[in-house]
Every structure is written in C-alpha cells, then in structure tokens.
Amino acid sequence: MKVIRDPIHDYIELDELALALIDTPQVQRLRRIRQLGFSNLVYPGANHTRFEHSLGVYHLARHLAGQVEERLREELLTAALLHDIGHGPFSHATEELIERYTRKRHDDVEELLRKGAISDVLKDFSLSPSSIAAHIKGETYIGQIINSEIDVDRMDYLVRDAHYTGVAFGLIDHVRLIHELRFNENKLVLNLGGLQAAESLLVSRFLMHPTVYFHHVSRIAESMCQHAAEYMIGNGLSPKILQRMDDVGFMNEMKNAGGYASGIAKRLDERKLFKRALYTSFDSLGMDVTKLRSNVKRVESEIAETAGIEPGYVLVDIPEKPEIVEMKAQVLVNGKMTPLDRASSLVAALEKAQLDNWRLGVFTPPEYRENVGSIAREFFEVKKDTKQFKLTEI
C-alpha cells in the first residue's frame, strides 16, 4: 500500500491494483486534462486535473466498498479510478462534439479497457472490461456508487472545484453523506440522518452552476474551442484521435491547423475572447429555443449572414434546460423509499428555482457586438420589457 497526499482528502491509500492502473498511459493522460476546461480564464487557480479527481473518486469509493460483496470490490475501485479516461481535451469543451461524431459518450469506455496497458492490468488481476464499463455507466447496482443521483463522483468534484476556484459554495459534509448511504433492494439510498448533508450538496451544486460551471467567460471559451474543433474535423482531424488528445496536444494541433482554428487558438492563448452580444433568461424569450439546439449551426449562419460576417464569428449557446438529477435520489423515511425532493422542502424549492440559472448566449468579436446583438434579439423574439443583464466583461 502506498499513500498520496491530496489537498481535499488528506491521504489517499493506493493498493497494488490501483498503482498498476495509475502507471498506464491512459490514466497518466488525465494529468494533462484540466477538470474545469477553460474556467482558469475566470478563476486562475482552477488548474486541477481529471487525474486528481479520479484519485478522489477512488478514495471515496473505498469508504463504501465495505457495503459491496468482496468479489466485486476490486471491480468497483477499478471503475472509480478509470471512470474519466474517456474524456476528451478540455473536458466538457469537446465532449458534445466528440459524442456527436463518434456516437459514444465519454463514459462508454469498454473499447479503451480492451486495448493496451489497461487491458493488460485487468487481465493480470482477472477483471472483466465489460463489467468495469457497466459499473462506470451506472448500469449495475454497485455502479450507483460512482454514477447515480448522489454518487462519489459528484461529492469529489463539487468540493474539489470549489477549493481550486476559491468560491465558498463547496461546503459539503461528504463524510456524513457516505456514512448515511446504503443499499436497499439493490438501490443506493440515503438514510434520513443524511438529509441535511444531501441538502448541502444540492445547494452547493445549484450555486456552483452559475458561478463556475456556467460562468459566461467559460461558456464563451468553450464555444470558441468547440467551433475550432469542428473546423478541424471538417478539415480531416479524426474525432477518435481528438478524443485521445490531451489539452496541450489539442492546442498545438489547433495552432497548426491554419485558418479559423489557428485564429481561435491565438484568441484563447491571449484571452482575447468573443463577447456577449445577447445573454438572457428563458423567461425573456418569445419562443422555446431548446427546440433549436439541433439546428444551432443554421441559426448561427442566419444571424451571421444578416450581420454580414462569417458564420464562425457568431456563436449561439443554447444549454439544455437545467435538470438536477440528484433531486430524485431516494431517502429512507420510516422504512420506505421517498424521492429527495419530496423528503425536503428545500430541495423542492431548488427544483423550482433551477430555471433561473439558464441563459441563452450569443457571442461574437467585440467589433460586431452591437449589430449582432440587435439581430439576435429580433431573431429570438426577446421581449422588449425584459430587463437585460449588464454585459460587463471580466
């Protein structure tokens, strides 16, 4: 057993299997993928990686391994350590694009588990790649520990992201949460004694979304990165190769791609980002824009054509309607399983308030901002009596 010092969990113990997995190129690659993508453009300390997070998830999963049959414990811990190896560069910045082209989500990792060094380690320890993949996707009862409504993945990233960004919203009693989690009828549920800890997790997640995960600067940088990646794929870059790159490799590829992609890479490097031409709430719109998510390229082209500029310089960001899946976690109340949003009036209130965090964004270089904003407001039927957010920039 070896020990790693972690700023969140203090000491993390690693056994022989974990050490063998960590030494594989697939896991070492996670050292070079930032957990929060471009959030360091807003919070300079947000340079922590998927590697650190994976160690944290492994550590928390160890605390719940006692509730799992002994023969399945190694599978659980392996899945916890490997749950993020399918992420592309800059994490979520390239995730949607890679999924669109490969038809696979980042947690569909079975192919990775069947090849190379990880495959060799799994064979040495008599572990099944298909079982590990199923646990990572939350398709098994023990997989709920890693991937479910309240899981160790969320517990680690909320606390870790709050720590490295410096925001004060990551106060989660994850030790209490883990202590109060148990299996009931093969469902991971929360004892009533853990209700307040679960509420703190939900409040933290609710506040972290607009402050960190959906901060407009992060959304702009991610949109720019995604459009550059799409340009590169259109010019011959394989989506599968893109998925295996790390942040540095992808940025170098972007810089050398020429044309639009190189221009975007220069802007990202120098933090000369596009600006918000329109940034408004769901209630301010005269249409259901979520129906346009599958045709965003057409919308961008139409606004750009009306403004007389190239399509790549009008970026439309239509996030999915916010959904807090943790609200459907089950709480044991008088021996019966009850959804968390029924067991807690605070959680129910958060469910109603979550749409307040939703924003439609239209981004463009500063010189086009006024013109594009006017056209976008008309296109999206923004209500004239709606008070718009001040478009001050950081």
Image: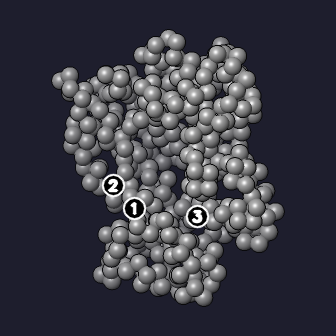
What whole-number distance in Å separates the C-alpha atoms at marks 2 and 3?
22 Å
The CA distance from mark 3 to mark 1 is: 16 Å
Q: Label 1: which residue?
A: 358
User: Going by the image, does 383 lie left or right of 25?
Assistant: left
- Residue at left offset 29%, top offset 50%: 351
> In the figure, is residue 370 to the left or right of 348?
right
Label 2 crowding class (10 Å Cα cut-off): few <14, some 14-19, many 20+? some
Q: Disc 2 or 3, which lies upstream in sequence? A: 3
* Residue at 22%, 36% in the rendered image: 343
Q: Which residue is drawn at 26% across and 54% down?
A: 352
Q: Mark 2 points at which residue?
A: 354
Q: What is the residue that sits farthest to the top in this orientation?
A: 70
For the point 62% across and 44% down, which residue is it?
Answer: 87
Q: What element carries label 1?
A: loop
Question: Horizontal and vertical percent for residue 378?
Answer: 42, 84
Mark seen at residue 223: 3
Q: State whether residue 254 appears in this view.
A: no
Q: Position of residue 18 (x, y in %)?
A: 65, 21
The spot of residue 309 in percent (x, y) is 62, 84
